[in-house]
Amino acid sequence: MPRSAFFKLVALAALLHVYLGFRLLPPMALGGAGLAVGVALLAASSVLVPTGLIASSLRRAHWTAALTWASLLSMGLFSSLLVLTFARDILLLILLLTGAASVEATRLSAIGVPLLALAVTAAGLFNARRLARVVEVEVPIAGLPAALHGYTIVQISDIHVGPTIKRNFLDAVVDRVNDLQGDAIAITGDLVDGSVAQLAEHTAPLARLRARDGVFFVTGNHEYYSGAKSWIDELRRLGLTVLMNEHVLRERDGALLMLAGVADFTAHLFDSSHRSDPHQAAAGAPPGVHARILLAHQPRTAFEAVEAGYDLQLSGHTHGGQFFPWNLFVPLQQPYVAGLRKLRTLWVYTSRGTGYWGPPKRFGAPSEITRVKLVSG
């Protein structure tokens, strides 16, 4: 992040914390000592919150892990505080207009906002750090041969190995994925937040992934923030098949399935040779393919994928919004937030993600490991 942009974020964070202080601390009537503690906590948060945005680029030192956790937890708490304070102000305005306002309501609501924000943040931390649940999805494919009925692809996405997600987290994910015994495993981008030098020891468990037809990976936008070419080389070294606008064919009793993959939707902004191209990914496939599956990090690739004739697109990127209210903004950028949707002849499944980005917090958008089963349509 450019230094000028970081300092602008620091200034914005400071102003928003001043707003929180003025709206919450005086009505609480905490006394001199309590007010001083409240001001000190808000001041510390105003510094920690923007620090969380550069957590993945901090130099590794014995104190870095503690600072990273403190800053990212502060980001999550600050988000809830800000939203709840806005909501409280709206509620107080309604009470004022209806003549129902009172000093006691103002005081109790000021105390309730940080307590509720802490509760939401604690629940979000628990949801984010626990092993992702397995979501079963059946996708009907028209004309699917009996030999491919029940073909399973285990999808993981948006793990974001980095500042707070380390080897032990990924080890547990790998164990769960292997237990599902999918015909193929698909990793649909945003695997890492950091360089190969920083994270190679933490992504090493990927070498243990096993599936009859292979383990496949496509890049997400965060790979391009972290050195995509180096990560592509590293993942291939670990035994993964990285699909860069290309496909592989798999056969069951004469029935053909195509697994294709494209680079991230925005990859060309970082490397012009990585431009996402679903048509190129399918080029050269024989005409007798019975199921055409595309791995694409961002759901918005679907508009090109349907024109290229795919039956199913597996995506991630959105995290399902990760936590309120950010789920409300995802549709401004992506056509789908989560789950199975239909775009004309194309099914699109959007994973809520297996890890999390930034604050270790998930609320209303549980993480998932997805077992996708193809069935006759």
Image (cartoon, rainbow, N blue to C red):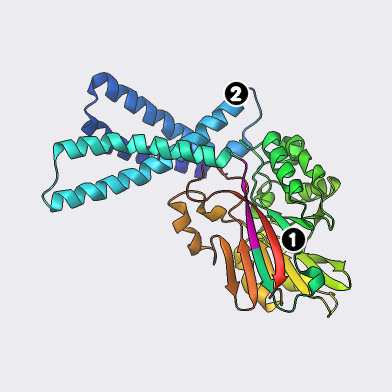
Q: Position of residue 190 (x, y in %)?
A: 66, 50
Categorize mark 2 by other alpha carbons within 10 Å: few (<14), some (14-19), many (20+).
Answer: few
Residue at the disc numbered 2: 63
* Residue in the picture at 53% in, 55% down: 320
Residue 111 located within the stretch drawn in magenta = no
Q: Nearer the viewer, residue 320 or 223?
A: 320
- Mark 1 vs mark 2: in front: 1
Quarter location, residue 39: top left
Residue 221 appears in the rendering: yes
In the rendered view, would you say 128 is above or below 339?
above
Instruction: Say left or right for 242 vs 90.
Output: right
* Residue in the picture at 47% in, 39% down: 123
Which of disc 2 and disc 1 is earlier in sequence? 2
In the rendered view, would you say 63 is above or below 102?
above
Q: Position of residue 131 (x, y in %)?
A: 62, 41
In the rendered view, would you say 275 is above or below 109?
below
Instruction: Say left or right for 148 vs 18.
Output: right
Q: Nearer the viewer, residue 134 or 330?
A: 134
Q: Position of residue 41 (x, y in %)?
A: 38, 27
* Residue in the picture at 76% in, 72% down: 291
Q: Which region of the structure is painted magenta?
A: 131-137
Going by the numbered disc 1, the residue's amino acid type is Thr
Residue at the disc numbered 1: 152
In the rendered view, would you say 178 is above or below 41?
below
Q: Nearer the viewer, residue 96 or 149?
A: 149
